[in-house]
Image (cartoon, rainbow, N blue to C red):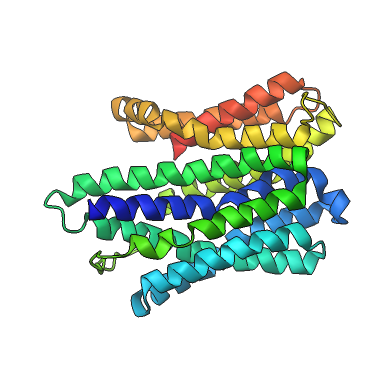
Amino acid sequence: MRRNRGVWFVSLATASSLLGDQMLYAVLPTIYADLGLQPYHVGILLSANRVVRLITNHLAERGSRRWSLAWLLAVALTTGALLNLAYGTVTWFPGLLAARVLWGVCWSFIRHIGLMTVVDAAAESPVGASRLARAMGFYSGISRLGSISGNLLGALGHDLIGFSATLVIFAAASLLCVPLGPWSRRGLPRTRPPHISASEPNSRGLLVCGFASGCVGQGLIAATLGAVLSARLGDVDLGFGLGVASLTGMLLASRWVADLLAPILGHVADRVGRRRSGAAYFVAGALVLGLAAMPQISPVLLIAAVLAFYVTATGVA
């Protein structure tokens, strides 16, 4: 029961920390001009937190070996929650860039300690491997709910009550969930995973595939979808006061909903082989992405192509 509680708490804390960050992906590409930003500013802001993690992931691993995990997680969650206020009040590009870089640091610690908490929660089980797989799946699923909520509710909130007001609400929600982080560590053993060599067979291929999938699926599409829809559709009115920001949020949220197909796509991979299925998913993803890039494509076909790409991205992952 204690182990289940730890997984529940850290999953919810992780999900809540993503609200403001994921809202930016849905909304910022559509309102950057109102904030006095340039298009290239958007790309930098939405990628800065990922770039800095190339360094801070190692920092999180080393810090987690030296200091209290509960304390580190509480600091990272609190700082991440307060950064929502910075997103909603700062319009100066260097200030927003500093906030995004700091969020990247926070996310390195949140993600690393979250995964360690799941591992620690399963450590005492006699069937640890099986329990760990279920716990990891649960953690990933709850985290995706945070992404879905940030994309969808953030976009809806922007259209209905405004950009800053929505981020203030997200900041309050994230702060309320901060205690769940340190509570998830109560009573758990602290495991020390053995060092694993990076020079494993096929590791280079996995790194290339992972980079390609993340760069396009979670980078290029997430950072530019709102701008593309805004250029193609203009100030479209979806009814009930909803506009292109809400449509962008719905489509970005569908990326995480598509992950619900992972068991089916994984079963296909088991049947036909991982190499063949991986190649098929990559080729299909390239084709639908090429279709989406066609200048004369209709809005309906553009949306369908984006949704199809998300399915192929799930298959690759």
The spot of residue 178 in percent (x, y) is: 48, 61
The spot of residue 202 in percent (x, y) is: 35, 50
- Classify 177 as above or below 271: below
The C terminus lies in quadrant: top left
Name which quarter of the figure residue 194 lies in.
Answer: bottom left
307 left or right, relative to 99: left
12 left or right, relative to 168: left
Q: Residue at x 82, y 30 (%)?
A: 232
Name which quarter of the figure residue 264 lies in.
Answer: top left
The spot of residue 127 in percent (x, y) is: 14, 48
Q: Is residue 11 visible?
A: yes
Q: Residue at x 66, y 37 (%)?
A: 249
309 left or right, relative to 124: right
The spot of residue 68 in percent (x, y) is: 36, 75
Q: Nearer the viewer, residue 19 or 123?
A: 19
Q: Is residue 52 visible?
A: no
Which residue ends up furthest to the left in the rendered image? Answer: 126
Which residue ends up furthest to the bottom in the rendered image? Answer: 66
131 left or right, relative to 36: left
Q: Residue at x 35, y 34 (%)?
A: 274
Q: Nearer the viewer, residue 310 or 130?
A: 130
- Classify 315 as above or below 5: above
